[in-house]
Amino acid sequence: MRQTHHHEAAHAVFALWSGLRVTDLRIGREELNGVMIEGVCAFVHGGVSDLALAEIYLAGPAVESMMDHNWNYNEINEDYLQAGLLLENVVEDITAVVAKVKQRVNSLFPEIDRLAKALLEHKRLDEHEIMQIARMPAWRLSK
């Protein structure tokens, strides 16, 4: 079963962890730039390294693979492709980055799950709602 609400919530929590603003979080099938998608996590990209941005992209697939052991983490998907492009000049092998992201997903899962449950209930959350629900430690948000 696809865990779109957890997938998008993981992107959001990782973006917040990196000190970025998450402005919109939503689930539901919609067309975006001519492509059908199941969810969106919109965040302000500035001020983080390519590695941190790649980790944000990898967080969605990481939480899906954690929740559905039959889901192929390395399956070609847009998030994995974006992370690969960001990392091509940073690391030789994406495997270590994936392992680090999976560890962080485990440690941040309470925040991811809390946000995912609210997203599943409301289908869309704005920046203020995201900040209230995720409850990231203040020291993480002070970048």
Image: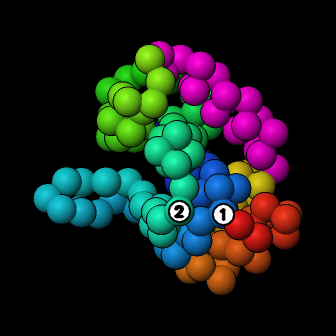
Asked whether, in this view, residue 33 is left or right of residue 55, the answer is: left
Which coloring applies here?
Answer: rainbow
Residue 130: x and y in percent read: 66, 73
Asked whether, in this view, residue 117 is left or right of residue 24, the answer is: right
Which residue is labeled 1 in the image? 19
Please tell me the numbered disc located at residue 47.
2
Q: Quadrant of residue 67?
A: top right
Q: Is residue 3 visible?
A: no
Amino acid type of the residue tagged 2 in the rendering: Gly
Residue 119: x and y in percent read: 60, 65
Magenta stretch holds residue 13: no
- Callout in the foreground (2, 1): 2
Query: What residue appears at the point 44 percent right and 17 percent down from the top-left corner?
Result: 92
Asked whether disc 2 touches disc 1, contact meaning CB atoms under 8 Å apart, the reply is yes
Structural crowding at the residue carrying mark 1, measured as other residues with C-alpha within 10 Å and reported as few (<14), some (14–19) or many (≥20): some
Q: CA distance from mark 2 to mark 1?
A: 9 Å
